[in-house]
Image: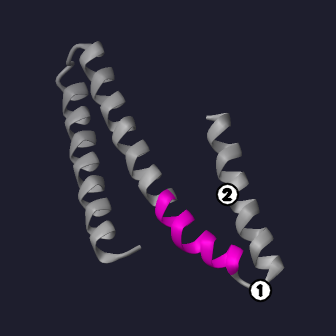
Amino acid sequence: MDDKKKTDTLRRLKSVAGHVKGVEKMIEEDAYCIDVIGQIQAIQAALNKIKAQIMDDHLHNCVITAVRGPDTKERERVLAEIAAVFETATRV
C-alpha cells in the first residue's frame, strides 16, 4: 500500500474508532436505541469502505504480481485466498 493510501486508511480507521467511542458513550447515557443503531450502521458502512479500499489495493498489487509471476503454486495460493475472503463475506 502506498503512503497516500495508508495515510487515508489510517485516518478512516481513527474516525471509526472515534465513532465507536461515541456509541459507547451513547449506551452509557441510555441514548435512544434507534439512534445507537444508526451510529452502528454508519460505523459498519465506514468499515466496509475501508475493507473495499484494502481489497482494491491487494488486487491491484499483490494479486496481479502473483498472477503474472512464474510460480503456479503462489498463483493458486493467492487465488484461494481471494476465494476464501469472498466465501467468508457471504456467510456474514
Vertical side of 67 occupied by 40: above or below: above
Q: Residues within 10 Å of mark 1 (few under 14, many from 20)?
A: few
Magenta-colored segment: predominant secondary structure: helix
Give the class, few, some or many, for how many residues have Cα within 10 Å of label 2's Cα (few <14, many ≥20): some
- Residue 48 image offset from top left, x and y in percent: 43, 43
User: Is residue 35 left or right of 46 when viewed as pictured?
Assistant: left
Q: Nearer the viewer, residue 28 or 86?
A: 86
Residue at the spot 29% in from the left edge and 62% down from the top edge? 10
Q: What's the magenta region?
A: 56-68
Q: Which of pointers 2 and 1 lies earlier in the amino acid sequence?
A: 1
Q: Which residue is mark 2?
A: 82
Identify the residue shown where x is 20% and y is 36%. 22
Residue at position x 17%, y 24% from top? 29
User: Is the residue 76 above or below the residue 35 in the image?
Assistant: below
Q: Give the CA separation, mark 2 to mark 1.
A: 19 Å
* Residue 4 is inside the magenta segment: no
Task: Give above or below for 11 relative to 66.
Answer: above
* The quarter of the displayed image where residue 27 is located: top left
Residue 82: quadrant of the picture: bottom right
Q: What residue sits 36% from the left and 76% below the top?
A: 2
Q: Which mark is residue 38?
A: none
Q: What x and y, as percent, mark residue 52? A: 46, 50
Res. 70 mark: 1
Q: Secondary structure at mark 2?
A: helix
Q: Quadrant of the N terminus?
A: bottom left
